[in-house]
Image: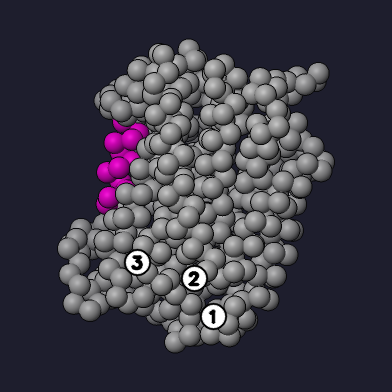
Amino acid sequence: MSEKNNLTHSNNRSSFTSKIGFVLAAAGSAVGLGNLWRFPYCAAKYGGGMFLLLYIVLAVTFGFSLMVAEIAIGRKTRLSAIGAFDKLKAEYSFVGVLASLVPIIITPYYCVIGGWVLKFLWSYITMPANQVAATNTAGLTLFEQLITSPTEPIVWFLLFLGVTILVIAIGVEKGIENSSKILMPILVVLIAIVAIYSCTLPGAVDGIKYYLKPNMKDLSVKTVLSAMTQLFYSLSLAMGIMITYGSYMKKDINIETSVWQIEIFDTVIAFLAGLAIIPAVFACGSPENLKAGPSLMFIILPQLFATMKAGRLVAIIFFFLVFFAALTSSISLYETCVSIIQDKFKQKRTPSIVFTFFICIIIGLLASLGYGPLAMITFLGMQFLDLFDFLSNSVLMPIVAFFTCIFVGYVIKPKAVIDEVETNGVKFKLKKLFTIVIKYVAPILIVIILVASILQAFGKISM
């Protein structure tokens, strides 16, 4: 990296070289395990077509407004979250601190889950599909054997973390932007192939109907809350990522159209992931497995692949695309951590990468061993990985999103964001919608999400 790219001052900050580079990098951040792992099981569990409809409506209103705000704040200040809020209004610097904690907590355990994906990919490359789906003499599935092992999850975690750091070390332009230009088109092609194959399986029609046809009987508070929560996972909101990427965005790039393109890309991937998984589960005559939740990918799908004629090939393609999606998101998470350290401590890029690595090792080791040797240690009944996920996704992200809305809506006022969007004479077509959502709609929805998440964690409600 050149000295220019190592500096974090606004006049010397690295930047994406083109609009397509920014959009694909930001979409790469948004498209991850939230799309290919969480979206399908949430759609399956919470009403199929109704969940899909609610998610799309919320994405083009709630998600659009929050993403515009975050990217505009980043581009306006040319800083990551920890410096951006402080620069705009020192009294609200705590929002930047909270936002910065989110990727620092998420990145390590996200790489742990990415390691699980790598393990399954390698297993399908080296083993028949029926062996991957089989249990050992103790009755444990491959996934259960993996997460309870004292050493194996650490090995796969370090491998995934190593690939992430390699891309980060190359830099914003050569590393993040160029890798996104390659990985994202590959991801679209792979998920489309799996989705088409899934929909052509005998018996898949019922699954397609369930997934695409909204049914009013499936409309419930749980469905709405689940769709809203999924937005944070899917769009990388309230974790400082879009502020960081916005700080790398050139002034001549249209924020509004870029956000639409990111959302379309992200939603299409999530939609295809659901289309790849849900019809296939119906085709295998086991729709009850749709309620399996997070275990759908690592326990139920291997059983599904074992019943297919070309199951091993489909599994390899599927886990390749999940690996790509997880990698693009881990890159954005790690880059956000690096940018935070650079801005906060005025460090060059390389020391910031190394410091982030040590943070990932400490938290990642706890998450890796939380279901095995450290399983006896719990907090609020949660193992380490579940605790980190709860703190970041269920507590910090809604809090950050709420204060971001308050900050934009009532402190710097929506006009500050609108002016940034309309730089160089660009017209912000949906500024009225943006203002209404950011000031009134989003804060109410976010408070509901936060309260529901905390009540669920303490067993007061079930989701």
Q: Is residue 329 left or right of residue 160?
A: left
> Mark 1 packing: few (<14 Cα in 10 Å), some, or many (20+)?
some
What residue type is disc 2 on? Glu
The correct choice, above or below, for 120 with respect to 136 in the image is: below
CB-based contact (under 8 Å), mark 1 and mark 2: yes
Residue closer to the observer: 376 or 305: 305
At a point 63% along the width and 37% down the height, the residue shown is 121
Quadrant including the N terminus: bottom right
Q: Return the residue at label 1.
A: 5
Q: Is residue 347 left or right of residue 28?
A: right
Residue closer to the observer: 312 or 248: 312
Q: Return the residue at label 2.
A: 173
The image position of residue 303, as x and y in percent, is: 60, 21
The image position of residue 208, as x and y in percent, is: 35, 23
The image position of residue 357, as x and y in percent, is: 69, 64
Magenta stretch in the rendered image? 50-61
CB-based contact (under 8 Å), mark 3 and mark 2: no
Q: Earlier in the sequence, mark 3 or mark 1?
A: 1
Q: Is residue 51 magenta?
A: yes
